[in-house]
Image: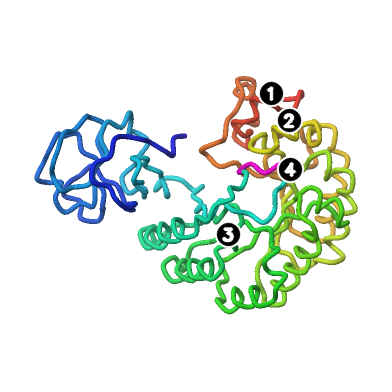
Amino acid sequence: MILKAKGRQFDITTPIIGRVTRHPENNNSEILISPDRFSRDWYGFKAVLSEIELYTSLEIPVVHSIKNLDHLEEGDIVIINTDGVVNTIYRINSNHNFLLFTERCNSNCLMCSQPPKDKDDTDYFFNQYSQAIPLIPKDCFEIGITGGEPTLLGNRFLKLLNQMKEELPETEIHCLTNGRSFAWENAARKVGEMDNKRLMLAIPLYADVYHIHDYVVQAKDAFNQTIQGIYNLAKYNQRIEIRIVLHKLTIQRLVKLAKFIYKNLPFVEHIAFMGLEHEGYTAYNIEKLWIDPVEYQLELTQAVTYLADFGMNVSIYNAQLCTLPESLWRYSRKSISDWKNIYFDECNKCNLLDECGGMFASGIKKHSNFIKAL
């Protein structure tokens, strides 16, 4: 799946955000994809994208000589950067859209699939999304917020959440956050005051004891801040999901963590047990993290059934059915985003292919030795 293209830019001095169209008569779009060397139809659009090489002195922002634009559908939202890079912000025909609020983070997780960058990108992303959010279709069913750590935008994080509530009142918003910022009650209170019943905050918890969680996220006092943040959010009636990435360091106390969640966090709406993604920092820490999923099925079964038996809502993400015991199949979800979801040739022989979530494209590098057709 292609989410980025690059060409040679002309007269683009600030990033341009808009919906793309191939139809010049479309007044609901801001950016035209044109096969022509020039057309008067270009006037009225914010910018023009083209695969052919253009020589123009017109006062119209253009990115030309782009290798391929076939990945862009009518109504997709893009940002055209000043270096000629065209990033797709929202895909009109996908159910896996997300908004990357920042690449900064106050944790440094051993298995982070998108390692944080130590630069202040607040202005860039705030300006991008404050323009893009009103363009997202009102019938969008669900959209994700991710990072980095989105709450590091501070008040601008709250402004974007408010904007999403106003512009997309029927859209489910799934925000990935480490929860640490909410250890300060004022932050949790401000989110609570928005009273957005469609907002869910997905927070990782990797152990029932502080030293393991803090080591996994590589941040001192992270466990205590996360737990306090969860309690503060619950105080203000926020919807909360707990996420547990499954690897060698979390398996050792997985069942105890499940019991901890039930006894101490019974109010959470959902618990997701998540297979490891071989991306980002995971590759550097693979010896510390890797365990074949087949090897931890006893612990996973005990943890999942314990929570489910007590009426908690449980799911398994990023897992292949052939690596799970049949008793866990009903908890398995097709969770991997379409742009990084693959199946092996062996999978095409499987009778359960349509029910299986497949794996990350990065799974080619490292995956279970027990992938097989059922």
Between 269 and 114, the one nearer to me in the picture:
114
Q: In this picture, which residue range is highlighted in magenta?
A: 110-114
- Image coordinates of residue 197 in percent, x first then y, are 57, 71
Contact (Cβ within 8 Å) of mark 2 with mark 1: yes
Disc 3 marks which residue?
Answer: 150
Contact (Cβ within 8 Å) of mark 4 with mark 1: no
Q: Residues within 10 Å of mark 3 (few under 14, many from 20)?
A: many
Q: CA distance from mark 2 to mark 4?
A: 27 Å
**Which quarter of the figure is the C terminus placed in?**
top right
Residue located at (75% from left, 32% from top): 286
Q: Residues within 10 Å of mark 2 (few under 14, many from 20)?
A: many
Disc 2 marks which residue?
Answer: 322
- Image coordinates of residue 226 in percent, x first then y, are 75, 63
Q: Is residue 128 above or below residue 288?
A: below
Q: Is residue 261 magenta?
A: no
Disc 1 marks which residue?
Answer: 373
**Can you name the residue that lies furthest to the front here?**
119
In this view, the mark in front (3 or 2): 3
- Going from N to C along the chain, the mark reached first, 3 or 2, is 3
Q: CA distance from mark 3 to mark 2?
A: 35 Å
Q: Amino acid at mark 2?
A: Cys
